[in-house]
């Protein structure tokens, strides 16, 4: 790979290259005078020459070999705009595929001149690292860097959606030896189509038949080009599925409008109000009714059904509100009456973006005739939302267990005989079939949790788990209390002789650095759960509500904001203070960086002068906060600069720091005891009211 082009790299980028945490890179910078000098950025977010960093890492034995793929990514970051980076990567993929005789990707003719060098570098590196490996690595980095703008379907969920469609499709009359067509009208980077191709091979659905056709459309040309390259690599590696990916607006002007698919898989954009409600008012696709302006997801459902062959199957990933919003009840009734909607599966929170809610899979089948739902037709409902507790992301979910449970339920429902009213296979727990006529009430609420009762076994398992947690927490409380009870406060000397200094004095003396949180731009702030590569954001309302960080920013945005001084980031080891009396908190930030909102402060102590836990312990004393408060209103503020700290040497601070940590641990344990106790009381109350009292005999 050529060394002719250098690129700036951040501390986080250096950490990725070296395979260490960001804190380790910061330590190298402090301990080694020879560490490269920044070539740009700011004091809080410096940037370094990639070439200088590589030489330093090699010279100091921090890394034996830097992968060519790792070197490539800073060059892509230097291109700046997301679309330019994506187009350059897609062009690199096209050239790599063309070199292998599998060119299926349109040429990116409008690339800026500076991107050509990066494309050349990528092609050069791929000769040593592997074409698909290089492309997949860079695509993953690109998606992570733009996680807010680019929504993807996690591979395990994509495969589950494909497997559901294949299971349902296998029970119908279609198929045979005809070529199967799979369509994704909002394909993004092609994850669902890739999963469909893999699923067909592994299920053996296409044995003795031609390879499936994979069709995709996306409004973003960069995403469409990346999807085409990604599927091209899959076919070159033996996937066997031909792909036709086009850029376009599926709802307004579908480039695949003349095609009828056997399977439609889709993760449509959520809450996209500008979907063409006015101009599409008379569109023939709206057989189930004109979707309201505020219900774009229903427009995608009707679009998917309009693109299916008779008995074709669609599986869509939708937000839970689609099942219950009042504006959509007319269309939900029509989907039930015609037999088009066959099932709804509630997934655990964290299955996909937005991670904070329990998304749903809607399973639909294009009716083979206009006869409507037969008498006795039943809707399949599965509530898997509470099967694994609250999740913080797709990595928190036991996907094999979840997928097995969903597929077992789909199979047990016996889709091939869904209109029959006779005996069926036993459905697994958490799954029910509800007569369609029972759902055609005023609300037509299809939320699985409203119809699937919690089983006695699940409730008992939760209570057993809660009792175990409570016993452990009580042991923790006893341990902390015994340690703190040994402290003799009466032997601490004359309080009048105690010397204290203010935070302002310490700031002026450079014993710490005080920074105040700032208002964050709403267009950059995301409110769902934290994905990989993002930085959590904390606000005072989050503290008032007793919750953790209520939002996050993309890592690239944080680095950019920190470099311009528009964001305040508390790093591990900083002391964070909430400067509002009703939400007054002080703690030492651990593990990960944290972006601070208004009225939050980050204090970075000089470790040779101040112990962070000693500093936090002094600041969080209630008496200290009372003295520094304004007391002018119910929302009185704390003047953080006036908070006082004991003036002690570093050696004298150590025992205080240990005691403060023990005190904080006791507080956390007591808070957890209260929360677990409340859950137990509610659970026991529900069980007793349901007549489940059975005392064990000893």
Image: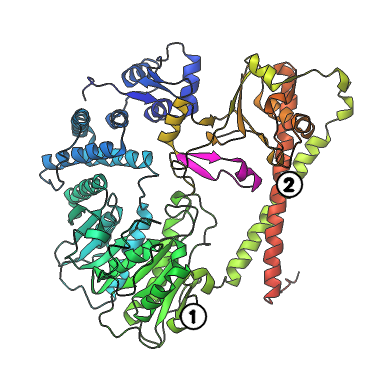
At x 46%, y 11%, the residue is: 33
Work out whether 444 lies above or below 281: below
Check contact, mark 2 vs mark 1: CB within 8 A: no
Element under disc 2: helix
Residue 462 visible within the image: yes
Element under disc 1: loop
Q: Quadrant of residue 68?
A: top left
**Image side of residue 4 versus residue 353, left or right:** left
Characterize the local packing of mark 1: few (<14), some (14-19) or many (20 or more) Cα atoms within 10 angstroms. few
Q: Position of residue 543 (x, y in %)?
A: 63, 43
Highlighted range, magenta: 535-553
**Image side of residue 408 versus residue 484, left or right:** left
- Circle on res. 227: none
Q: Position of residue 561 (x, y in %)?
A: 45, 30
How far apart, in angstroms, are the residues tagged by discs 2 and 1? Answer: 46 Å
Residue 166 visible within the image: no
At x 29%, y 75%, the residue is: 287
- Circle on res. 670: 2
Q: Nearer the viewer, residue 293 or 663?
A: 293
Q: Which residue is mark 1?
A: 441
Outermost residue toward the top in this view: 33
Q: Position of residue 210 (x, y in %)?
A: 14, 64
At x 24%, y 34%, the residue is: 129
């Amino acid at each position: 790979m050529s060394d002719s082009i250098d690129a700036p790299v951040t501390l986080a980028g250096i950490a990725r290259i070296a395979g260490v945490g960001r804190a380790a890179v910061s330590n190298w910078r402090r301990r080694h005078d020879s560490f490269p000098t920044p070539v740009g950025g700011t004091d809080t977010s410096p940037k370094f020459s990639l070439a200088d960093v590589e030489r330093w890492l090699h010279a100091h034995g921090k890394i034996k070999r830097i992968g060519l793929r790792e070197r490539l990514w800073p060059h892509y970051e230097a291109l700046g705009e997301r679309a330019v980076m994506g187009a350059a990567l897609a062009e690199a993929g096209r050239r790599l595929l063309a070199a292998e005789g599998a060119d299926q990707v349109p040429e990116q003719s409008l690339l800026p001149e500076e991107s050509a060098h990066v494309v050349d570098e990528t092609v050069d590196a791929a000769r040593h690292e592997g074409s698909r490996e290089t492309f997949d690595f860079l695509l993953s980095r690109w998606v992570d860097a733009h996680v807010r703008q680019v929504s993807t379907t996690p591979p395990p969920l994509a495969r589950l959606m494909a497997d559901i469609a294949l299971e349902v499709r296998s029970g119908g009359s279609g198929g045979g030896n005809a070529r199967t067509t799979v369509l994704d009208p909002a394909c993004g980077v092609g994850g669902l189509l890739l999963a469909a191709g893999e699923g067909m091979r592994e299920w053996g659905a296409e044995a003795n038949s031609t390879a499936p056709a994979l069709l995709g459309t996306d409004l973003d040309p960069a995403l469409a080009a990346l999807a085409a390259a990604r599927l091209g690599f899959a076919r070159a590696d033996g996937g066997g599925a031909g792909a036709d990916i086009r850029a376009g607006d599926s709802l307004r002007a579908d480039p695949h409008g003349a095609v009828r698919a056997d399977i439609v898989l889709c993760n449509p954009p959520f809450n996209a109000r500008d979907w063409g409600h006015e101009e599409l008012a008379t569109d023939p696709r709206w057989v189930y009714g004109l979707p309201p302006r505020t219900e774009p997801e229903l427009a995608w459902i009707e679009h998917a059904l309009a693109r299916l062959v008779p008995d074709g199957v669609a599986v869509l990933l939708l937000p839970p509100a689609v099942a219950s919003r009042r504006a959509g009840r007319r269309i939900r009734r029509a989907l039930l009456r015609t037999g088009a909607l066959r099932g709804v599966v509630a997934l655990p929170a964290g299955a996909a973006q937005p991670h904070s809610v329990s998304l749903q899979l809607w399973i639909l089948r294009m009716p083979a005739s206009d006869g409507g739902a037969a008498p006795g037709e039943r809707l399949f409902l599965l509530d898997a939302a509470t099967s694994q507790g609250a999740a913080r992301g797709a990595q928190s979910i036991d996907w094999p267990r979840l997928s097995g449970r969903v597929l077992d339920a789909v199979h047990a429902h016996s889709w091939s005989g869904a209109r029959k009213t006779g005996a069926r296979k036993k459905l697994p727990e958490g799954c029910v079939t509800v007569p369609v006529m029972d759902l055609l009430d005023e609300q037509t609420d299809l939320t699985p949790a409203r119809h699937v009762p919690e089983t006695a076994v699940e409730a008992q398992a939760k209570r057993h788990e809660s009792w175990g947690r409570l016993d452990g927490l009580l042991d923790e409380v006893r341990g902390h209390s015994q340690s703190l009870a040994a402290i003799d406060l009466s032997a601490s000397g004359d309080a009048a002789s105690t010397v204290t200094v203010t935070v302002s004095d310490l700031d002026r003396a450079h014993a710490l650095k005080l920074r105040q949180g700032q208002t964050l731009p709403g267009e950059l702030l995301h409110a769902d759960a934290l994905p990989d590569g993002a930085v959590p954001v904390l606000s005072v309302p989050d503290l008032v509500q007793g919750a953790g960080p209520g939002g996050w920013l993309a890592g690239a945005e944080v680095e950019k904001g920190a470099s311009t001084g528009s964001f305040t980031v508390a790093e591990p080891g900083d002391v964070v203070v909430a400067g509002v009396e009703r939400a007054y908190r002080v703690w030492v930030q651990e593990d990960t960086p944290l972006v601070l909102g208004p009225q939050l402060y980050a204090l970075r102590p000089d470790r040779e002068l101040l112990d962070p836990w000693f500093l936090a312990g002094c600041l969080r004393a209630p008496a200290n906060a009372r003295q520094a408060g304004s007391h002018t209103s119910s929302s009185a503020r704390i003047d953080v600069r006036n908070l006082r700290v004991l003036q002690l040497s570093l050696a004298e601070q150590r025992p205080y720091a240990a005691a403060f940590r023990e005190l904080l641990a006791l507080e956390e344990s007591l808070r957890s005891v209260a929360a677990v106790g409340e859950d137990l009381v509610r659970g026991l109350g529900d069980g007793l009211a349901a007549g489940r009292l059975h005392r064990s005999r000893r």
